[in-house]
Image: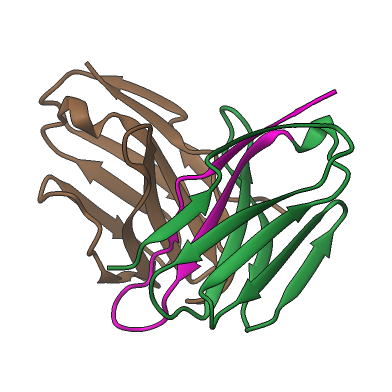
Amino acid sequence: ELKVEQNPLFLSMQEGKNYTIYCNYSTTSDRLYWYRQDPGKSLESLFVLLSNGAVKQEGRLMASLDTKARLSTLHITAAVHDLSATYFCAVGVSGGGADGLTFGKGTHLIIQP
Amino acid sequence: GAGVSQSPSNKVTEKGKDVELRCDPISGHTALYWYRQSLGQGLEFLIYFQGNSAPDKSGLPSDRFSAERTGGSVSTLTIQRTQQEDSAVYLCASSLWRFAEQFFGPGTRLTVL
């Protein structure tokens, strides 16, 4: 059974600081996604990582994937209040009938002025 | 263009009643997924459709849950004899093809009294 672990689950940080959210998964995967969820809203797709060593950046967020270590990171640079949200990583396993994504529990991020 | 839409946005029902939840995927997306999100269980995969067929029903929690998709487009998730533990937000997602990026709808918040 595929397990996806995120840490930390809760993070309070100050504006201007840098931090990293980690996503570990238990079995071989070829697809990893990062989503953002604001309170009372649905999931917004941030990044799609499909290969070992993949790195993607959008604004102050950068995601990377190490398939050998079964680890993805979401790095926040010089955080601003607008980035406050819950961030989920999700892992897909192709084939074997397991077509849905398995999500981590989410990291609740609060960025304080 | 239009995103994934779901209806109703909120549904309150009494224990033992049947409910139907609807999802309209993004036009042209062949893959459709149902998930549910609850405080206790996080985000869980329920079922996946490719076209009108459902090759992966592995996440349906019981035989009270069923889903169909017609015309390769609209999908309906039906929960029979609802129980209080069915209370959750039910999210629908669609993707262009089987392993592509999934885009989520706004969800249906189901409350079973």
Q: In this rendering, would A45 be left or right of B6?
A: right
For the point 55% across and 68% down, the residue is: B29
The picture places residue B110, in percent across and down from the top left corner, at 34, 28
- Return the residue nearer the eye: A38 or B100: A38
The picture places residue A6, in percent across and down from the top left corner, at 51, 52
When asked about the image quadrant of residue A99, the answer is bottom left
The answer to whether any part of residue B69 appears in the image is no
The answer to whether any part of residue A93 appears in the image is yes
Q: Residue A99 lies in magenta, yes or no?
A: yes
Q: In this rendering, would B70 be left or right of A84?
A: left
Its colouring scheme is by chain
Task: Quarter of the image for the C terminus of chain B: give it.
Answer: top left
Q: Residue A77 lies in magenta, yes or no?
A: no
Chain A: colour as depicted: green
Q: In this rendering, would B35 be left or right of B9?
A: left
Q: Is residue A10 above or below residue A1?
A: above
Q: Is residue A41 above or below residue B61?
A: above
The picture places residue B93, in percent across and down from the top left corner, at 49, 55
The picture places residue B6, in percent across and down from the top left corner, at 48, 41
When asked about the image quadrant of residue A43, the answer is top right
Chain B: colour as depicted: brown
For the point 21% across and 54% down, the residue is: B60
For the point 37% across and 32% down, the residue is: B39
When asked about the image quadrant of residue B112, the answer is top left
Task: Quarter of the image for the N terminus of chain B: give it.
Answer: bottom right
Q: Is residue A70 above or below residue B33?
A: below
The range drawn in magenta is A84-113
